[in-house]
Image (cartoon, grey):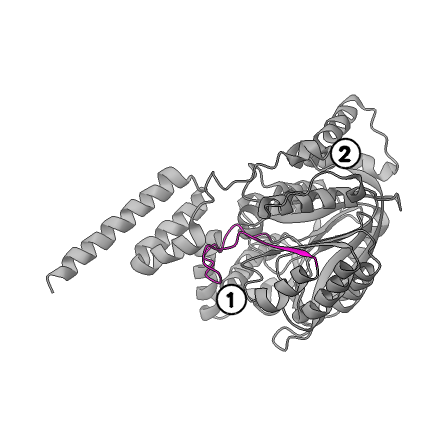
Amino acid sequence: MEILPFLSGFIIFFNILLALTIVFLERKNASSTWAWIMVLMFIPVFGFIFYLVFGKKLSNKKIFTWDTKSRLGVKKEVQRQLRELEEGTFQYKQQSLVPYKDLFYLHLRNDDAILTQDNQVELFTDGQEKFQALIEDIENAKDHIHLLYYIIRHDKLGQQIADALIRKAKQGVQVRILYDDMGSRQLSRKNYVKRIQDAGGEVEAFFPPLIPKVNLKINYRNHRKLAIIDGKVGYIGGFNIGDEYLGANRKFGYWRDTHLKIQGDAVRSMQTRFILDWNQASRHDILYEERYYVAEHKGDVGIQIVSSGPDSEWQQIKIGYIKMIMAAKEYVYIQTPYFIPDESLLDALKIALLSGVDVRIMIPNKPDHPFVYWATLSNIGELLRAGASVYIYQNGFLHAKTIVVDGKIASVGTANIDVRSFRLNFEVNAFLYNDELAEKLVSEFKKDITYSSQLTLKLYQERSNWIRFKESISRLISPIL
């Protein structure tokens, strides 16, 4: 029995030591620091385990040094566009872009995101249609296929895509697949990965563990979804590869997401993003070759491919969201599965609301992560009080990550509105400058309203005390979710 006081004292001392480490060495922001201190103090032993799994900072030795951008010609083009914007000599193919020059100037400076103005975009909101198009483009590939997905499952859809990739690899098409090791932790190396490799394809995992199947790196995952075929066609958006994204999962039902098929110069930026990520994960670097950059001019949609992640100083996608919201004169429409903004984005939405901007937010009616869901409802309450319109999507699960402003500009990609997407995961979004495409996204939003119920302030205030309690707890730990 005498050992218990000693053990108790040791645990308290160890937790205080770890708390001091978080405060003085990790340099986290204040909200996440307090959240972790609370976890460590109230759950002494398990709190430490949670910290090892969820909270450990990415070591400076592991932070990416992607100087490949210079070799791929990105830096030179960025400097040219910045100079022309500053001197007033930049050539706009669409005059509708002019009012938003400060937004794409921001992305140029903050993320080296080149503005392209000659893209054709096809919009997908249904998984069956998206994957039918992707598989068709894979079947038509002549030179190379590059796929990057957070989740790849060894199910019916995953096998269908693997079979198509194996056929192309055997025909001599260069096939490369990059998947996130945590997101795709159930993927079989023996029955899935090896089959593709045996056919001549290359497959790599992002941040794999030292011991197979024992990956404790919950944070710093590659949440991006990209597909580039022959350097001419690119896919970007929210769909992963798995049967649930076709609506085949009973728990979630119909899967409502948003994805884009792009043809035009923006595919070059998508290709660069894939090459940078591949070179980080693989020992076999992709070097610059012209055949990877043969995108053809197809349309008149302006696009910037913007990336963010824990390796960068600024939260590029979040800052882009805030800039879009602050530019709104009429409305802001948002679709997101999780709504856990930090104070800066929450304040931007409140300012827009108080300025008379119509802010509408659509979230799912069911959680895939309970704490995240209750934290979402807590934040939604604040905006309801400021005058926002909130819709709960009822026709399955809403996974789209979309923002539309004034029917002029939009963003579609992989970043949710939460701390994990803004600070902890590697994300990529397409920022879109085109009236017609933005209006299509508005039309899809309004169509989704017909499948939604409206959450009014009155209904929100009538929620039970049990729900209020769950919201309060979830909000306290939301900085580390």
What element does badge 2 sit on? Answer: helix
Residue toward you, 359 or 475: 475
Give the amino acid type for the residue marked by disc 1 in the picture.
Answer: Pro
Q: Is residue 49 visible?
A: yes
Q: Was residue 238 drawn as part of the magenta stretch in this picture?
A: no
Q: Is residue 188 visible?
A: no
Q: Residue at x 80, y 66 (%)?
A: 132
Compared across the picture, whether 425 is left or right of 71 comes to left
Please state the horizontal and vertical placement of residue 305, each as a whole percent of the image. 72, 43
Q: Residue under circle 1?
A: 370
Please tell me in which quadrant of the rendered image residue 315 appears.
Answer: top right
For residue 431, which numbered disc appears in the image? Answer: none
Compared across the picture, whether 208 is left or right of 129 comes to left
The extreme left residue here reads 2
What element does badge 1 sit on? Answer: helix
For residue 101, which numbered disc appears in the image? Answer: 2
Q: Does residue 82 lie above or below 22 as drawn?
A: above
Principal secondary structure, stretch drawn in magenta: loop
Which label's residue is closer to the chain start, 1 or 2?
A: 2
Other-residue count near label 2 (Cα within 10 Å), few / some / many at <14 / 14–19 / ≥20: few
Specify start and end residues of the magenta stretch as a single range: 200-222
The extreme top residue here reads 87
Residue toward you, 324 or 259: 259
Residue toward you, 261 or 303: 261
Total number of numbered discs in the rendering: 2
Compared across the picture, whether 47 is left or right of 89 comes to left
Residue toward you, 313 or 58: 58
Give the amino acid type for the residue marked by disc 2 in the picture.
Answer: Lys
Q: Was residue 212 drawn as part of the magenta stretch in this picture?
A: yes
Other-residue count near label 1 (Cα within 10 Å), few / some / many at <14 / 14–19 / ≥20: few
Please state the horizontal and vertical placement of residue 412, each as a whole percent of the image. 72, 52
